[in-house]
Image (spheres, rainbow, N blue to C red):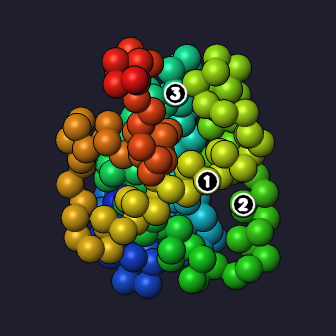
Amino acid sequence: MLNSAYTLFVQSGYTDVSMQQIADAAAITKATLYHHFRDKQELYIETMRLAIDRSQCYFRDNLNDSDDLRETLHALVNYHFGTHKTDMQRLSSDFKRYVDQETQEAFWQQYCQPWDFFYQPLAAAIERGEIVPQDVDTLARYLFGAIAGVAMTQHVHHRRSIPDTEEIDLYIDFLLRGLAPTPMPLANAQARD
């Protein structure tokens, strides 16, 4: 039932999906659907829970177990360019538009922020000397926002293909090193003197 609702809400949006369509897709009666969910909004909220649980499961499985910051960033870039993230963006947009503010606030208090999954990998990278020591919360929010922003830009401009490994590596290099030129290796600098 939830999976059917999830698929229909992602494909058509909140306003263009009826409870009858969901019941038909789930091969149940509309009465059975209303037995489990008081109304469409309640079903939509449960669909959002399903989407967030999937996202958080992905983050737990792919972001916290690696000792390599590059691997963590690869996993996040792949997530943001994958179809699940696009689904989440569609569901979240309709959630913000059609669910009352009080219900939204209560809902979001039940979940950690997506960038919270970056704390451990960033703290470990700082400890290993891979990145400059900074406030981990700020780094996590900025890093998550930078990756999510690029994925959203790709979506808006209809360039939703998953980048190839070379493009992902280039983007991760940019995130980790910025725009500054790469320092010349010591051997080359001494040879020039």
- Give percent across and percent down for residue 136: 73, 40
Q: Position of residue 171 (x, y in %)?
A: 36, 46
- State the residue position of label 2: 108
For residue 21, above or below residue 161: below
Q: Residue at x 40, y 65 (%)?
A: 152
Q: Earlier in the sequence, mark 3 or mark 1?
A: 3
Image-quadrant location for residue 118 = top right
Residue at the spot 33% in from the left edge and 51% down from the top edge: 81
Q: Viewed as shown, does residue 68 lie left or right of 18? A: right
- Residue ID at (68%, 26%): 126
Element under label 3?
helix
Amino acid type at circle 1 is Tyr
Relative to 129, does residue 162 appear above or below in the rendering?
below
Q: Amino acid at mark 2?
A: Trp
Q: Mark 1 sits on what residue?
A: 142
Q: Residue 53, relative to residue 42: is it above or below?
A: above
Q: Judging from the image, what secondary structure is the residue with disc 2 in?
A: helix
The quarter holding residue 57 reads top right
**What residue do we see at 32% from left, 74% from top?**
156
Say whether marks 3 and 1 touch (CB < 8 Å). Answer: no
Which of the two residues, 148 or 103, is positioned nearer the viewer here? 148
Residue occupied by mark 3? 69
Q: Which badge, 2 or 1, is on the more N-terminal residue?
A: 2
Judged from the image, the secondary structure of the residue bearing numbered disc 1 is helix
Q: CA distance from mark 3 to mark 2?
A: 28 Å
Q: What residue type is disc 3 on?
A: Leu
